[in-house]
Amino acid sequence: MRISEMSSAEFAEAVKKGPVVILPFGAVEAHGAHLPLGTDAIQPLAVAEEVAKRTGCLIAPLVAYGQHSSTKRMAGTIGVRMETLKALTIDLVDSFYFHGVRKIVLLTGHAGTIHMAALKSAAEELVWKYEDLRLMVLTDYDYAYRMNDEICGGEEDGHGGIIETSRIMALRPDLVKKKRKKGRSIGPNFMVVRDPQRFYPDNFVGDARKATAEKGKKVNDFVVDRLTEAIEKNFGD
């Protein structure tokens, strides 16, 4: 159930049962010309909804913005600093803890390196702060990319590519453009530069022409199955 749709009394009663709360993180980020800027929000929310149906988890309102590096200069990418994201994560978990929540999943649809570092750094501080807090941090792509060989046939795939385009086609086909192409990456060779966008001339990586809704459903189902298992394993009493 979505926490934003509960009354204060309903939330207080639900917390007494010791629920797992899924706190989804999205992003507003360019994914080529064929995918919406909210791609990274659509995916974790859909996963959270399905997992909640199976496990009874509560779903917190989405944190809509993330941290961006390689895509930050691409049109439409709107983000926050690593320090901001980390501080916001700590504040939100602090608040949930104050109200009695002890089991939380930080699930992000955006998997940027620094974005993930912010969430994981926040989580480390939080579990040291609260001895009885049980906290999980992951991106749904920790599971989705396990299907790379099956879905992509060994081809290079990444941001806005076959898997991600397929997932959005399965969830929101109305937002995926029919005209798609293959995106390239050059690679910065470990260099940290001011203009990383030049390494991604197409703003995405992978052959989006090969994406299908059927592939997307297969990946989405796999992610839901694996996350359900992880929650039952790590939070089961």
Image (spheres, rainbow, N blue to C red):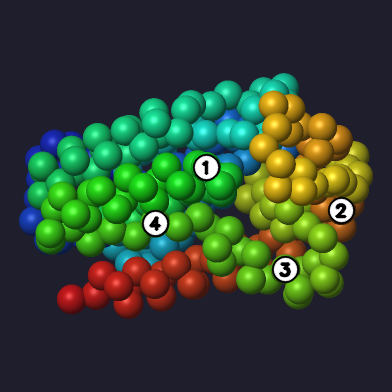
- Name which residue lies at 56% across and 47% down: 113
Q: Residue 174's spot in the image, x, y percent?
A: 72, 39
35 or 97: nearer the viewer: 97
- Name which residue lies at 23% across and 61% down: 134
The quarter holding residue 137 reads bottom left
- Name which residue lies at 40% across and 46% down: 119
In what element is the residue under mark 1? helix
Q: Residue 9's spot in the image, x, y percent?
A: 10, 40
Residue holding disc 4: 137
The reply to whether dot 4 and dot 2 touch (C-beta < 8 Å) is: no
Name the mark nearer the viewer: 4 or 1.
1
- Going by the numbered disc 1, the residue's amino acid type is Ile
- Going by the numbered disc 3, the residue's amino acid type is Asn
**In whole angstroms, how far apart are the C-alphas of marks 1 and 3?**
23 Å
Mark earlier in primary sequence (2, 3): 3
* Up/down of 17 relative to 230, above or below: above
**Relative to 227, 205 lies left or right:** right
In what element is the residue under mark 4? strand
**In whole angstroms, how far apart are the C-alphas of marks 3 and 4?**
22 Å
**Counting other residues with Cα less than 10 Å from the Cα at mark 2, is it few (<14), some (14-19), or many (20 or more)?**
many
Question: Which mark is drawn over residue 148?
Answer: 3
**Counting other residues with Cα less than 10 Å from the Cα at mark 3, is it few (<14), some (14-19), or many (20 or more)?**
some
**Relative to 105, 150 lies left or right:** right
Mark earlier in primary sequence (3, 4): 4
In what element is the residue under mark 3? helix
**In whole angstroms, how far apart are the C-alphas of marks 4 and 1?**
14 Å
Name the mark nearer the viewer: 1 or 2.
1
72 or 182: nearer the viewer: 72
Q: Residue 163's spot in the image, x, y percent?
A: 72, 58
